[in-house]
Amino acid sequence: MTLLAHEAGVARVIADDPWITLGPDETLDETLDEASDVIVPLEGLDRVRPVARGRVGLRVPGDADADAVAARLGGVDLVQIELPRFTDGRAYTLARLLREKHGFRGELRASGAVLPDQLHYLARCGFDSFELADGGSVEDALAVFSDLSQSYQPAADGARPAWRRRRPVS
Amino acid sequence: MYTYDAFDQRMVEERAAQFRAQVVRRLDGRLTEDAFKPLRLQNGLYMQLHAYMMRVAIPYGLLSSDQVRRLARIARDYDRGYVHFTTRQNVQLNWPRLEDVPAILDELAEVQMHAIQTSGNCIRNITSDPFAGAAADEIADPRPYAEILRQWSTFHPEFAFLPRKFKFAVTGAREDRAAIAVHDVGIRVVEGEGGAIGFAFYVGGGQGRTPILAPCIRPFVPERDLVSYAEAVLRTYNRLGRRDNKYKARIKILVKQTGAEAFARLVEEEHARIKDGPLALTDEDLEPFKRAFRPPPHAVMPAEDPPELVAARLAKDRAFAHWERHNVSPHRVPGYANVSLSLKSRDLPPGDVTSEQLDAVAELADRYAFGRVVVTHRQNLVLTDVARRDLPALHGALAKLGVATPNVGKLTDVVCCPGLDYCNLANARSINVAQDLLARFEDLSALHDLGDMHLNISGCINACGHHHVGHVGILGIDKQGTEHYQLMLGGSSGDEASLGRILGRALTGDEIGGAVERVVVAYLQLRESPQEPFLATYRRLGPAPFKEAVYDAVGA
Ligand code: SF4
């Protein structure tokens, strides 16, 4: 698994990811420093958040309801959305709703069925980082990220609609 | 006509380059067929029975003569010298090689065309009234709105992996020639208070396995909210549409299971949140789109028929008279007409056109129709804006090309999907049924007497031939491994849209042609007057007499 992030329309590899992922039954103990940044599933959130001294991330499935997720975002710095299949596009809407409806400003991370050719659309919907699925070529992912240099419609990236951008701003 | 600016041009060029690289990765094995599939599908490339099939988008069916010439050239250079026009106003190449597809995309990009989102579970090409901008019964030209929706939906990052494909149709006329009731979203331009333009949104119609006529979920969406309302509908669908069963994944199932009113409330809630955001359209946003579709420079013509036309009629040229009656429709400007070119003859499968014919049609469009050609959802072509005085000359030229069969809207103007000859989903052949019917009803005078009678054929339940909305619909099914056909009657995609009903047991390939003939004979005996069209007779009497006529002969 390789972690990628993007900035100013360019994707890059993240070598030193501070986040540690916890399973549903794991909790912070001696083996894990309480100051670590941990990503926990929804079921573990109430158990881990009170004791964590590092940052807390929340992992949700791509079909989670945005309003329900938003209700749990207090003190959460990262939301990891897991795509069950790359053909399941709900994660894109979930990300936009968390950003644009609920104003989530922390990191949005895509994991699960994340393929190189999807990163561009995911980024436009508000994702900051991507765990590339095994088998996907990192080189390809970096290369194709910038295939399209412009877009017609606004999304979570604040792009202006092309039909307005093409006119000089008065 | 909308022409690309540098921004649009760059978009299609970047897409062509992107797809070229994807093909390279596929050919050298970096992309598996599984991973390549959704990418090629978003670019209109299907794997068919014999080869790849490539679908090229024709937004709202409108082509310039240069685009027509380019399609002719592509078909000649990369395919077998003909193209196929589809029921969604698109065009298909049946035999391109994967290696050639990038070059074809480059050729298309040069004339402002592309294959973006012509397949896959995304927003597809937006269709419209073939007489848009030229119809006598138009409230407003729908094409500026279709174009702005095209731009909004192109590479929409959120809606590339919907539960299922998604089709829009937009009409601006009083008579619905865009079949908006059987689309995922059908949009009808309406006039509100004080003449303000707005849109009625019909959501959740469709054909296929579960045909449903779309309910109107909002009768008046203001002009400024066109795009934001569409986005609210799509977001609601992407969030809640079913993904567990591909046969229940279209928005029609969601709307039906949620209930139209409850669905409308969900859309309203989302729309209230976004309607004043960046998608709200201003007059300045809309103006360039409206300007792009201003009518061509029509001449001022006298109201009475021009002498050329009168002379042609006086010459008792029956072919011309039939053609004028059936293939020529009224135009909003006096002295002009809209001319339909029939792509239904015995020479080629329905909707197929050769490169030579395309080149010739492009010439005629330049000479007589301001260089524009429109593709219709009944798989014909239309030249809008033809001066009536040119009709006799144009008729002569079209007859030579074999596209003047005076059967537009008649029984032999068969709408037909490619069926088992090309399509790997098909249960039965469809083209041969269409050609059998063309042969049976070759005596055109009998046909003229029939009035409007639409016949639609699909090779399987996916209904690409729109059999549910044919006045007479034929569906290919597989019965114990042999081709059979279900006959249905009473469908319509027009103003009072309705879905056809199955008449009786499925018929064999040998029986189906004769069965249609017996329906026709029964209709001729049953109609109250020659003015009563088939659909009206059927609606008055129901299926019983037709059922009797068909199954008494072949056995129930
Ligand atoms: S209706 Fe069926 S056979 Fe015909 S083109 Fe569509 S999928 Fe193929």
Image (cartoon, coloured by chain):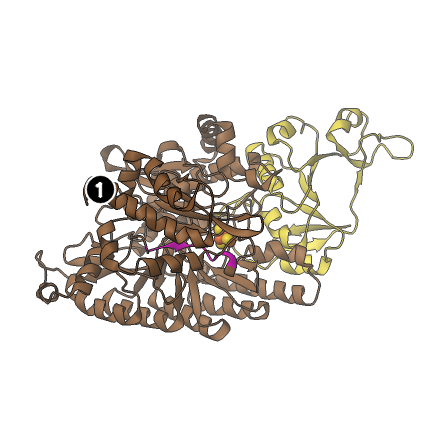
Chain colours: A yellow, B brown
Q: Is residue A159 magenta?
A: no
Q: Is residue B413 magenta?
A: yes
- Residue B119 x %, y %: 52, 53
Placement of B432 over or under A87, stated as above or below: below
- Residue A169 x %, y %: 41, 50
Q: Secondary structure at mark 1?
A: loop
First to last magenta residue range: B412-420
- Can residue B317 be seen? yes
- Residue B357 x %, y %: 35, 70
Q: Amino acid at mark 1?
A: Glu
The answer to which image quadrant residue B230 occupies is top left
Q: Which residue is mark 1?
A: B532
> Does residue B531 appear to the left or right of B485 in the view shown?
left
Q: Give the farthest residue toward the bottom.
A: B77
Placement of B142 over or under B348, stated as above or below: above
Total residue callouts = 1
| Chain letter for the residue marked with disc 1 in the picture | B
Q: Give the farthest residue toward the right.
A: A30
Q: Residue at x 58, y 51 (%)?
A: B481
Q: Nearer the viewer, residue A150 or B389?
A: B389
Q: Residue at x 67, y 40 (%)?
A: A107
The answer to which image quadrant residue B526 occupies is top left
